[in-house]
Image (cartoon, helix red, strand yellow):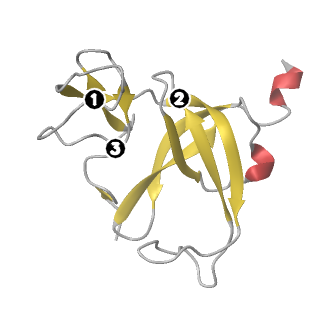
Amino acid sequence: MTATQPAVAGWFTTGPDPALLGSRCTTCASTYFPPVPAQGAFCRNPACDGEELEAVELSRRGTVWSYTDARYQPPPPYLARTEPHEPFALAAVTLPEGVTVLGQVADGYGVADLRVGAEVELVVEPLDDSLLVWRWKPVTELGEEADQ
């Protein structure tokens, strides 16, 4: 079976150019991820009294704000990809919209492939046989910048 559906419906798109989905205040343009439900919505910016938010696709590229190596198996509902649990890298990525989004790093990459300020791109990969998740993939391999 090939994974075809997002692990969290409404948080990201799939396909050749996947994107995270967020909400933007129509009054002050503050942007949020994950998206805010339209009903009962309000802007979380304390300086804004906006109550209307629009759905937006967020930028597919951002810069690494921080990263870490997840050496422990988180509790359910997390789905361990391997048994026993194998460590994986997590990156907090700041998008041009000013939102910082935490996500796993793409398959084949780890903390040795990351640095603060490096550019990463959103990719969608299978979590298991049926679900897809977003991950961050380094745009430039480490050491490649020095050669340019």
- Label 1: how many Cα within 10 Å (few below 14, some 14–19, many 20+): many
Residue located beneath label 2 in the image: 61
The residue under label 2 is which amino acid type? Arg
Location of the N terminus (image quadrant): bottom left
Q: Which residue: 33% across, 32% down? A: 44
Outermost residue to the left: 39
Under tag 3, what secondary structure? loop
At which x and y percent is residue 59? 44, 26
Name the element at disc 1. Answer: loop
Q: Which residue is mark 1?
A: 43
Query: Identity of the amino acid at label 3?
Result: Phe
Q: CA distance from mark 2 to mark 1?
A: 24 Å
- Choose the circle earlier in sequence order: 2 or 1: 1
How many neighbours does mark 2 have within 10 angstroms: few (below 14), some (14-19), or many (20 or more)?
many
Examine the rendered structure and indicate whether residue 43 appears above or below residue 110. Answer: above
Point out residue 8 in the picture as x, y percentages from the top left corner: 31, 56
